[in-house]
Image (spheres, helix red, strand yellow):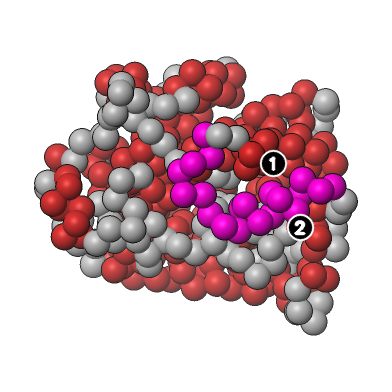
Amino acid sequence: MKRAATGALLGLAIGDAMGFPTEFNDLAQISAKCGPWRTMALPVASGRAYVTDDTQMTLALGEGLVEAMAAGELTADRLESPVRARFVEWSRSPENNRAPGMTCLRACEALSHGGAWQAASQVASKGCGANMRVAPVGLIPGLDEDQRSGAAQLQSALTHGHPTALAASDLTAYTIRLLAHGTGTAELLPALRDHAVRSRTVYRADWLGDLAEYAHDPDRVSFIARGWDECLSVLDRLEAALAVADAEADPCLATGAGWIAEEAFATGLYCFLMLPDEPRAVVRRAAYSSGDSDSIAALAGAFAGAYLGADAWPEEWVRDIEYRDRLLALGAAWDE
């Protein structure tokens, strides 16, 4: 077994740790810190490669999903309560000191007061804080396509309610699912485009409730189509970038800096698709970038790990990664 779930979760955390010290730096600053990108080291301090809120929230979501599915078939009602509780717990944790996104903090504060989650959702934000954590939805077994899509969008909407955040989270989870189950790199982009086109006019009211009414679109279909159209546009940009890909150039110049959801997805996937059989190079190239380096590298690592499995990552990197035991426990349960 390639152990795709373990590979994806470890890859996400490794990429996150690799990009932690390079976020907010330009390439000259990164070069001064890290040397050439192909020999970039996993940063270790006091025996740990420290991660950011990207990995912390991924664990919160994954463990919330486990609790939700222990109660029966996954539905919106079963997902919302445990994941909400874990997001709020994360927001109040003393370990939440890794420059977390303001959208997540604002939404979690609102969620902590109770009431309808839709009122807490930040419908104007399409930051990457929703799709950088969505990997568990693509990995957890036992979901059909409608459940997987609905769960990906709902976990996004708890904090980031912009339709592009919903669509990018859905597309990210779908990408990880395809790679984990053997879809080849040549088949991937056509499959993603097909999923986006099929999803474009599907508003998942059973998962999202009246979220669209908190925005200013004329109707629910217009709301969700706005997000999928932006994802289709970034898929065009990704395809064009891959046609002239240059692994020696800053990937953010090709597909965006990654601060917003669709660009984080595209740039992480760009790094993976340039170097699909070189997982170490994938996370190094993604982390050695001028944009949201930790989130881009977390996504790139998740894609590489889902595709290649747990053995993609060096033993010493796995040994040193923060939250290793929790990551391995989730991965082992889902791989079985």
Which residues make up the magenta segment? Answer: 95-114
Question: At x 14% / y 40%, what residue is drawn?
Answer: 39
Which residue position holds label 2? 120
Spatial separation of the CA atoms under disc 1 and disc 2: 12 Å
**Up/down of 72 relative to 169, above or below:** above
Q: What amino acid is found at the position of numbered circle 2 in the picture?
A: Ala
Which residue position holds label 1? 88
Question: At x 80% / y 38%, what residue is drawn?
Answer: 81
Whether residue 137 appears in this view of the structure is: no
User: How far across and down, in percent of the image, does residue 113 sit?
Assistant: 81, 48
Tag 1 secondary structure: helix
Asked if residue 105 is among those painted magenta in the image, a careful observer would answer yes
Whether residue 245 appears in this view of the structure is: yes
User: How far across and down, in percent of the image, does residue 119 sit?
Assistant: 81, 60
Tag 2 secondary structure: helix
Question: At x 44% / y 22%, what residue is drawn?
Answer: 324
